[in-house]
Each structure stands twice: as C-alpha cells, then as structure tokens.
Image (spheres, rainbow, N blue to C red):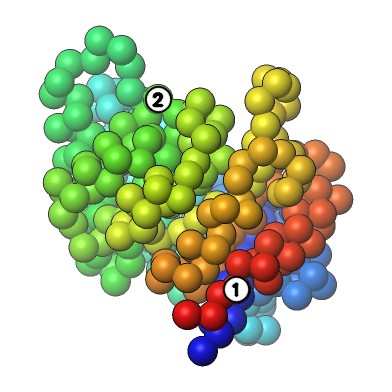
Amino acid sequence: MTRSPLSIGVVTDEVSRSLPEALEIAQSWGLGRFELREGEAGRFPAFTRDEVAALEDARRQGGRITAVSPGIFKGSVEDEAATRAALEDTLPRTIELAHRLGCPLVIIFGFERHEGEPDASRTWAMRAFEAAADQAHGAGMRVAIENEPDFWIDRPEPSAGMLDEIGHPALALNWDPANLHWGGHRPTVADLEVVLPHLANLHVKDYAPGRPQAPWFPVGEGQTPWADLLPTVQSSSDLEHVTLETHCEPLVESSRRSLDALRTLLDEATVTP
C-alpha cells in the first residue's frame, strides 16, 4: 500500500511577521498546520489577545497548532538565573497557552556548549532537559530539543545518546538538518536513522556554504540533501507532517517557492513498501 505524502506545516513568522496575515496566506496555500514562534509583542507565549483569537479562529476552521517555540535554553547552562526563569516562568506560561491551543509539542534548545566548559555542565543541561520534560509530561505534552551548532544538542550520535541517557518519555528531538549542515556536517540518511527513534518534529529549510552573511535559500535552491533525506522520513518516521522554516527574504515569495519545491520532493519521496 502506498503511503500518502506527509503533510506540510509552516512556522508562521517565516511567512509574515503579522500572525493574522501569516495564517491567511498559509491557509490560501492549502496549509493548516502552524508552528508558533514570534508574535507582535514578542516570542511565544507573549502573544496578544488578537493573535490568540486569530489562532482560535484558525482552529475552528480545521487548523492545528503543531508546536510552539518560546526560545528557552539558548544561552549557557551556567547562567543559573536564566535557566531558573525559563523553568519557573517562561515554560509554565508556554505550556498553559499551548495546552489552551491544543498544541502537543514545545520546542526548546540545547544550551550553548563552550570549549573548556566543566564536565558538570553536561549534567546540568541534562537535568534542565529532564525538568522541562517533567512539566510537559504533566500537561500531556512533550518537549523537543532543536539541534544547533556548538550546543549540547548538535551532532546526531551525541544528541541521541544524551536523550537515551535521560530516558524521559516526554523528551524528544526537533531535528533541523540544515542547522547540522550550517555547523559543518552535511546531513546523511545514516544521520537521520540515528535520530529517528527520538524524532518528534522536522524543520525544512535549505543551506549552502559560500555566502556566510546569508547562507539560507528557498528549499531546493541550496545544498542540503533533501532529496536524499525525505524518502526515509516518508517511509520510516512516525511523523504526520514536516514543517517549513523559510529563513530567507523576501518571506512570502521565498515561502511560496519553498512550499512548491517541498511538495514536489514529498511527492517524489512517496514509496510503495
């Protein structure tokens, strides 16, 4: 039996910085899965009443909020005050609003990893991830850590190893192959197979070296090997959708080109077992 192509979601502020406009444009393109990050007043959960109302209206029309990203754990794990604020303030407010919007997933980051950092930093990072997962689990949700270059969650094997070591049922991975590529490692199918057991969300954008100030491109126009990766995502992952993260200007035009290319790639990736 042929599996239908994966659905496509989108990070709303990668279509427009205005959330209502982003929702309207995405819906006109046939998209109904939305990942939330930036709003008018700041990063989620700092959304205005009008923005929340627009999201609730989109949900009434059949839309789904697939993930939210409050931007926590982007600094050093040694910044105890920032970690405490994330766990005691930002994350609880994020989970409360995400739960209200029917969202099952909170995306967090993996703390910057500095050369010469004490061995204890790894333990502190793991404890923070576990504490975040505990909060999400209590609300029937999960947290997914996004890989970034030179973070504790970065290359596939060490990242999967850390998640295995923590072993929390509400802790997963938001994998971004283009971030891995940006960090100097061209992603492979073998890398994907390493992270598949932990994969809760996949960001799709495109990267190419040689333009350091603007290394991001519409999907299919850079060098991240999506044609290699997506057939395995399609055939072997538990994902229902992948999430477009444009990352280059002009947003609407680049998002439209990326969406067209991604739809073609997913059609080509559809396999018959």
Residue 49, visible in the rendered structure: no
Q: Residues within 10 Å of mark 2 (few under 14, many from 20)?
A: some
Residue at 64 percent across and 60 percent down: it is 10
The numbered dot on residue 270 is 1
Q: Which quadrant holds residue 222?
A: top right
> What residue sits right under mark 2 in the picture?
150
**Label 2: which secondary element:** loop
Residue 64, horizontal then vertical, whole percent: 56, 74
Residue 14, visible in the rendered structure: yes
Residue at 45 percent across and 29 percent down: it is 149
Looking at the image, which residue sits at the far front? 273
Against 54, residue 84 (above or below) is above
Label 1 is placed on what type of residue?
A: Thr
Residue at 40 percent across and 48 percent down: it is 190
Which label's residue is closer to the chain start, 2 or 1? Answer: 2
Residue 207, horizontal then vertical, whole percent: 65, 36
Label 2 is placed on what type of residue?
A: Asp
Q: CA distance from mark 2 to mark 1?
A: 34 Å
Q: Residues within 10 Å of mark 1 (few under 14, many from 20)?
A: some
Against 5, residue 62 (above or below) is below
